[in-house]
Amino acid sequence: MGADNALWFTERLTHKIGRITVDGEITEYPTPTLGSGPLGMALGLDGAVWFTEVGRNQIGRITTDGEITEFAICSGTGPVGITAGPDDAIWFTEYDGNRIGRISMEGEVTEYVIPTRRSNPFSIVTGSDGALWFTEIGGNQIGRLQP
């Protein structure tokens, strides 16, 4: 659910971000980068919806007015999962990069290497303890990062 009380969703294969109102009205917004493959999505504390672009190694941000901004991260990392962190930033997994990334509201990216080789982090959530919890598909375990 977005700050505008609409449901937001990704359309990975058509490279669009979708929005459906409580009245059932659907609006689709194409991402600016061809082949972006939007996947994960999270509501930021800034009221915008943030999303991963697994196909082009980017993090996207869309306002309730449909304005999209894209932020590049390291190539070949494959961002998948995304969540709003306890520190007012957005956190995401880098499936192919074996890292957890953090992006500030201004677009500054910081990355943290996961000690497990080929862990393939996928989903990520902020726990009630203020830590970030993430799945390691390749490592067959759950990871924890304290920001």
Image (spheres, rainbow, N blue to C red):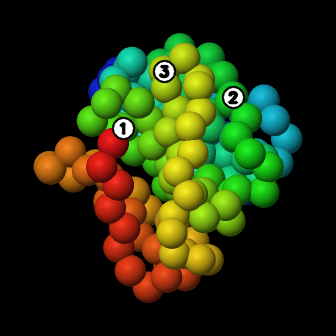
Crowding around mark 1 (Cα neighbors within 10 Å: few <14, some 14 to 19, many 20+) is many
Helix, strand or loop at mark 2? strand
Residue type at numbered disc 2: Glu
Provide residue 101's location: percent of width, then percent of height. Answer: 54, 46
Q: What residue is rendered at 38% in x and 80% in y?
A: 141
**Element type at mark 3:** loop
Q: Which residue is mark 2?
A: 70
Which residue reaches farthest left?
A: 128
For marks 3 and 1, the one nearer the N-term is 1
The image quadrant of residue 85 is top left
Kind of residue indicated by mark 3: Met
Q: Picture coordinates of residue 145 (x, y %)?
A: 35, 55
Instruction: Please state which of the two labelled residues, at mark 3 or mark 2, is closer to the viewer.
Output: 3
Q: Is residue 127 visible?
A: yes
Along the viewing direction, whichever of 73 and 31 lies nearer the viewer: 73
Q: Residue 127's mark? A: none
Amino acid beneath label 1: Ala
Q: Quadrant of the N terminus?
A: top left
Q: Badge 3 is on which residue?
A: 105
- Sequence-wise, the earlier of marks 3 and 2 is 2
Q: Which residue is tagged 1?
A: 84
Above or below 142: residue 71: above
Are circles 3 and 2 on residues that touch, CB within 8 Å?
no
